[in-house]
């Protein structure tokens, strides 16, 4: 069965494609902090686009791609490819973006797609503890 993203696809502007609403909001904060639109080669993918990547991976063995029925983080609007982002890692990390494509190469965990970034959800904050109710005696 084909996966279809059912969330809101938010256009990033400047020909950069689309992401989910939380990811797009994070990119807009990065844009404001850097003073210009972050260079993004590719963002969210439709099932058809993911299938093109999958077929190329099956044929050529590169670049790494997931079956479009998995679905990938790219199909969920949570990942970007960006050469510029590699140069401003601290800013991306401050906004929840991480490199996530590692493979074991010669027995060592190795970053194999340094241009690919995925936004991770903010850690859940525990609910505030209730304050004890204080009564005053007259």
Image (tube, rainbow, N blue to C red):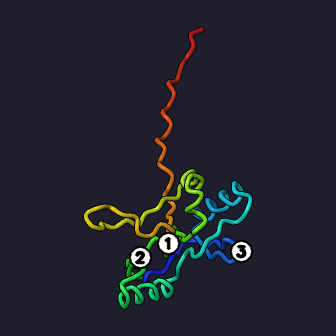
Q: Secondary structure at mark 3?
A: loop
Quadrant housing the N terminus? bottom left
Do tag 1 and tag 2 residues touch (Cβ < 8 Å)?
Answer: yes
Q: Based on the displayed image, in which of its 4 quarters is residue 23 positioned?
A: bottom right
Is 16 or 110 nearer to us in this picture? 110
Residue receiving disc 1: 76
Please, is residue 43 above or below residue 131 in the view? below
Please, is residue 81 above or below residue 61 in the view? above
Disc 2 packing (10 Å; few <14; some 14–19; many ≥20) = some
Disc 3 packing (10 Å; few <14; some 14–19; many ≥20) = few
Residue furthest toward the front? 106
Q: Based on the displayed image, in which of its 4 quarters is residue 2 positioned?
A: bottom left
Is 60 or 69 nearer to us in this picture? 60
Q: Residue shown at 30%/68% (left/top)?
A: 105
Residue receiving disc 2: 71
Distance of mark 1 from mark 3, alpha carbons?
20 Å
Q: Secondary structure at mark 1?
A: loop
- Marking on residue 14: 3
Quadrant housing the C terminus? top right
Distance of mark 2 from mark 3, alpha carbons?
26 Å
Q: Residue shown at 25%/63% (left/top)?
A: 107
First of labels 1, 3 by sequence position: 3
Report x, y in % for residue 85: 58, 63
Q: Secondary structure at mark 2?
A: loop
First of labels 1, 2 by sequence position: 2
């Amino acid at each position: 069965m084909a996966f279809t993203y059912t969330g809101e696809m938010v256009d990033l502007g400047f020909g950069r494609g689309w992401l989910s609403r939380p990811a797009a909001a994070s990119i807009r904060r990065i844009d404001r902090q850097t003073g210009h639109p972050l260079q993004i080669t590719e963002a969210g993918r439709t099932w058809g686009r993911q299938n093109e990547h999958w077929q190329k991976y099956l044929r050529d063995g590169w670049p790494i791609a997931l079956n479009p029925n998995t679905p990938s983080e790219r199909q969920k609007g949570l990942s970007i490819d960006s050469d510029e982002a590699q140069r401003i890692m601290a800013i991306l990390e401050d906004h929840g973006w991480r490199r996530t494509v590692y493979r074991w190469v010669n027995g060592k965990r190795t970053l194999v797609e340094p241009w690919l970034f995925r936004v991770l959800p903010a850690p859940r904050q525990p609910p505030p503890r209730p304050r004890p109710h204080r009564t005053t005696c007259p």
